[in-house]
Image (tube, rainbow, N blue to C red):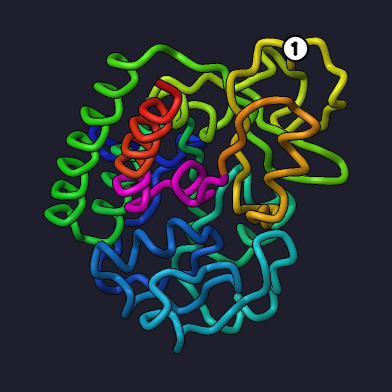
Amino acid sequence: MILPTSIPADAFGQHHAALGRDARIVSLVPSITELLCDLGLSDQLVGRTGFCIHPRAALRAIPKVGGTKDVKLDRIRALAPTHVIVNVDENPRPVAEALSAFVPNVVVTHPGAPEDNRCLYALMGHLFDCRAAADELSLALDAALTEARAVGAELPAESVLYLIWRDPWMTVSRETYIAATLATVGWHTVPPEASERYPSFDWRAPWLVGVDRVLLSTEPYRFQDKHLAEVAALSGRPVQLIDGEWTSWYGSRAVAGLRKLATLRRALAGERA
């Protein structure tokens, strides 16, 4: 059967059964778990990872099925989901392939930039019969993108080193959602080119010369205030702690994240002036 092109597909181009309120959903992606709850679908969530923490009250009673990498397949099988939502970056491909053996719909997601959330909202709205809520969220995203882009256009661009790990030190390539989100407010990540999406580096790397600012993310490594002096000494640049959820969580949190980034960018530009 040939499906109309207007029907949303997942990141692999797959079309899935739209079961609406009859769907039983397991989410293996923390930010999408939050999105589903914000779309009014918390009562259809039958499983989630231990890293799915927002919204805390709504998720307290929903069974955990392991982590994003170490998924407990037997637990998911016992929950008999109609849909399991996975992500290219967060869940290993062998896990998705194993799930497809007994889950009717393994929905693959892979937003590459903040604007890609529109397609994500539309897909969830189609699959789970919550189009009105999805459309409302898209309007909020458009407003947040406009605000963030205005800041990016208003202020001089800055080259930033965005740290996600320590020992070894690791950053992000420009091919990541994080880098695309930062670029929206005029923060351009280094290195300009990388063979890996999340490369490790040495503080003697020549591309560090042009860095204007270092951003320490609170996830996946939990950078804290105590790390600021260490990184400032290593980099010789201004260092700022930043909430990793603002840059790496898509779904509904992307709206608040873009606004928070715009506010922070303006505040730091004011300090520098």
Residue assigned mark 1 = 207
At 81% across and 38% down in the image, what residue appears?
169
The outermost residue toward the bottom is 61
Residue 68, horizontal then vertical, whole percent: 65, 61
**Magenta-colored stretch includes residue 242:** yes
Residue 80, horizontal then vertical, whole percent: 52, 78
Pick the quarter of the image with the N terminus: top left
Mark 1 belongs to which amino acid?
Answer: Trp
136 or 209, which lies in front? Answer: 209
At label 1, counting other C-alpha atoms closer than 10 Å, the crowd grade (few under 14, some 14-19, many 20 or more) is few
82 or 39, which lies in front? Answer: 39
Picture layout, residue 98 above or below residue 214: below
Residue 187, horizontal then vertical, whole percent: 48, 23
At 29% across and 70% down in the image, what residue appears?
41
Q: Give the extent of the magenta segment.
A: 241-257
Is 100 left or right of 56, judged from the image as shown?
right
Q: Quadrant of residue 8?
A: top left
Say what secondary structure mark 1 lies in: helix
